[in-house]
Image (cartoon, rainbow, N blue to C red):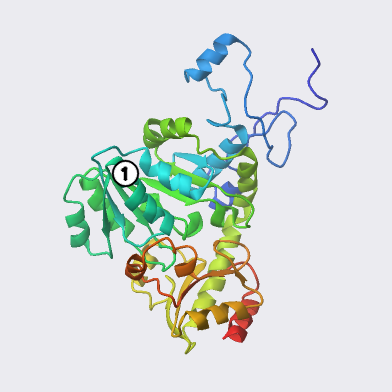
Amino acid sequence: MSKRPWGYQPVAEQPDPQWSLHPQTSAVRSGLARSGFGETSEALYLNSGFTYTSAEQAAESFNDETDHFVYSRFANPTIAMFEQRLATIEGAEYCVGTGSGMSAMFASIACLVKTGDHIVASAAMFSSCYVVLTEILPKWGVTIELVKGNDPKTWAVALSKPTKVVFIESPSNPMLDIVDIAMVSDLAHKVGATVIVDNVMASPVLQKPLTLGADVVMYSATKHIDGQGRVLAGAILGSAAYIQEHLNPFIRHTGPSLSPFNAWVLVKSLETMGMRVEQMNNSAQAIAQFLETRPEIKSVRYPGLKSHPEYAIACKQMSGGGSTIGIEFNSPKADVFKFMNALRVIDISNNLGDSKSLITHPASTTHRRLTPEVQAEMGITESVLRLSVGLEHPSDLLKDLEQAF
């Protein structure tokens, strides 16, 4: 048998700091698992399987009697680094990475429900989430009730029947509706429901749903977590009991796995997420204020504006308004398209949370799957655009918008 490769030596780990690390430090250091080569950048393990020193060790590994990787569909060193790092940033006990944001959304709920169970959800949400809740899960015999707004009495009535899951998207995509997470979580826990929050639009930087009373947080890591348009990924975070008893068995057997390469990209992306999101948030605030001054605009939906209907709630649970702005024009669709086509810096694209500023027309792209009635209920008209503010200098973005007007 050949010797170990040149330079391979067991690496002694540094003692843990005797103080609580700042989230930005955790974004660089948490979950670090160096190999025997002592690499500075995190290692990328692309292997699908793992070997064992004996048949007994293999049997013990599959029986969870020893700490050993079994198969990369279940767990992988690179994926584990991403999961541990994001869990530390979020303040969660555990994190599970998935192949996309929608696989994270579906798995976070599906692992809990069965025929006869009931789900209550906030009415404003991304179109694919709406389809999962109102079309796919009802085929399993799961009932759904949607609640609009933040009236505690309305939520209490919806939760007056036995409820298994409460699903909240706050802020919502694309109109940035805000749900009072603490209020809804308190009501939901009184009836024994598990509260799941889609925190994509806020990102882990600007909102911490677990501290507000939520039980589970899910992300499309494609957005701000990567934030550079390179990979698809999702993440689900929660307690050890939720992950081990409900989510892991579902994930293990249905296989919505995160690839090690995408996990490695995300590990590196987390190092700069805080700085990126803060810059995007600051630029979005300035742009939202500018848009409010334009006569062409009917309304601007941005949680950082005092004109937002749920501004007080946003201030209570978010540290910033985010990177996305909902814009409704005073003009018909043809003029809105003309405006989009006149942009020279901002790209037309249906993604968001990206380093490049992106704009889309939700009614004909991201939310076209919904009926006109549902779109109208969510405030999505033919005159609405969604602007995702990136990392370009805000002066150039403002000039681009002004010349397009």
Q: Nearer the viewer, residue 275 or 269?
A: 269
**Rendered-image quadrant of the N terminus:** top right
In the rendered image, which residue does mark 1 sit on?
A: 139
Q: Is residue 218 visible?
A: yes
Q: Position of residue 15 (x, y in %)?
A: 61, 34
Q: Position of residue 87 (x, y in %)?
A: 49, 43
Q: Residues within 10 Å of mark 1 (few under 14, many from 20)?
A: few
Q: Residue visible at 37% across and 31% down?
A: 245
Q: Position of residue 225 (x, y in %)?
A: 56, 53
Quadrant in which residue 113 is drawn: top left
Q: Position of residue 154 (x, y in %)?
A: 20, 61
- As helix, strand or loop, the secondary structure at mark 1 comes to helix
* Direction from residue 381 to residue 194 in the image, left or right: left
| Dot 1 amino acid type | Lys
Q: Residue visible at 23% across and 40% down?
A: 116
Q: Residue visible at 26% across and 60% down?
A: 147
Q: Residue visible at 64% across and 19% down?
A: 51
Q: Is residue 91 visible?
A: no
